[in-house]
Amino acid sequence: MTVTLAPDDSGIAEAARLLAAGELAAFPTETVYGLGGDARDDRAVARIYEAKGRPSFNPLIVHLPDLAAVEQIAHLGPKARKLAAAFWPGPLTLVLPLRDGAGISPLVTAGLDTVAVRVPAHPLAQQLLRAFDGPLAAPSANPSGRVSPTRAAHVLEGLSGRIAAVLDGGPSAVGLESTILLADPEPVMLRPGGVPSEAIQALLGEAVAAGGDAGRPTSPGQLASHYAPGASVRLEATEAQAGELLVGFGAVQGRLTLSATGDLVEAAAALFDTLREADRLAGPGGRIAFAPVPQAGLGRAINDRLRRAAAPRD
């Protein structure tokens, strides 16, 4: 059952308590309602994908209360710092290099070395972030592919029963998702949104490029072979061939496993760490075999990333 929490001290405290326990809680921002989960907790982040029915592990935006908190997990270049000073708090998301030891779940970054961060302006979001005292991963609080929610009622229409709570802060003021920008070394608009490109160009005094291309990806997931370890990868394996390290799932046992019980949430939470560990154990020129994972629910996202890891490389 999903509870609706009032926008007062008691509601904020309960939302923070649920988030600290690894539960999901939707909350208002000035753009749209976000589906919050502890960005440091692999299982909480996996539950975000499960609740939304998100088809692949696309990077999630991390919400933080201020620039000082952002600097604890990411590096800001000169242009990013200038943009942050002008537009934070506000509807601007910056894609920044992730700090070593930041503690952010690899599911949030899709295993990349960058992280998308935002400082929301909504007073209730600010109060929740400070009460929770940590980074919140928060995509829009709606089933994947559906219209983004701008009221608590919209959240409940799509996610009731899938999440613990929604903090009701009334209608969102902007009603449009945040602008996503790669600022340094050259500004690239990855998604238009609440901060128009004209305002960014005026501040920086230079043109903002649109999007990217497969040869020079500027956002995650643009290359077919993107999440590839050094070792080669074989999929749908029920046993290891000579020289292979087998990663199991469910009844298929391996040297490592995504989930011995066949739990897709556990498997999703373990995916990137297991891929790295398997690559380390396999060694240079090694081979990794992954047991079959069902093509359902979070299994679709897991299989998407495994296919990318196994894709032929130049």
Image (cartoon, rainbow, N blue to C red):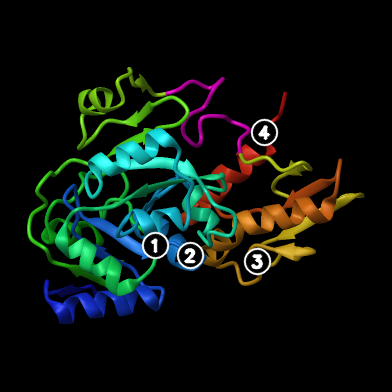
Q: How many marks?
A: 4
Q: Earlier in the sequence, mark 4 or mark 1?
A: 1
Whether residue 150 is visible here, answered yes or no, is yes
Q: Quadrant of the C terminus?
A: top right
For mark 1, give the secondary structure.
loop
Asked whether 194 falls inside the magenta stretch, the response is no
Q: Are marks 1 and 2 in contact (CB under 8 Å)?
A: yes
Q: Nearer the viewer, residue 172 or 295?
A: 172
Q: Which residue is mark 1?
A: 135
Identify the image quadrant of residue 171: bottom left
Q: Nearer the viewer, mark 3 or mark 1?
A: 1
Name the secondary structure under disc 2: loop
The amino acid marked with disc number 1 is Pro
Start-end of magenta stretch:
212-226
Q: Give how far apart the Cα atoms at labels 3 and 4 are.
A: 24 Å
- Residue 311 image label: 4
Per the image, the residue denoted by label 2 is: 40
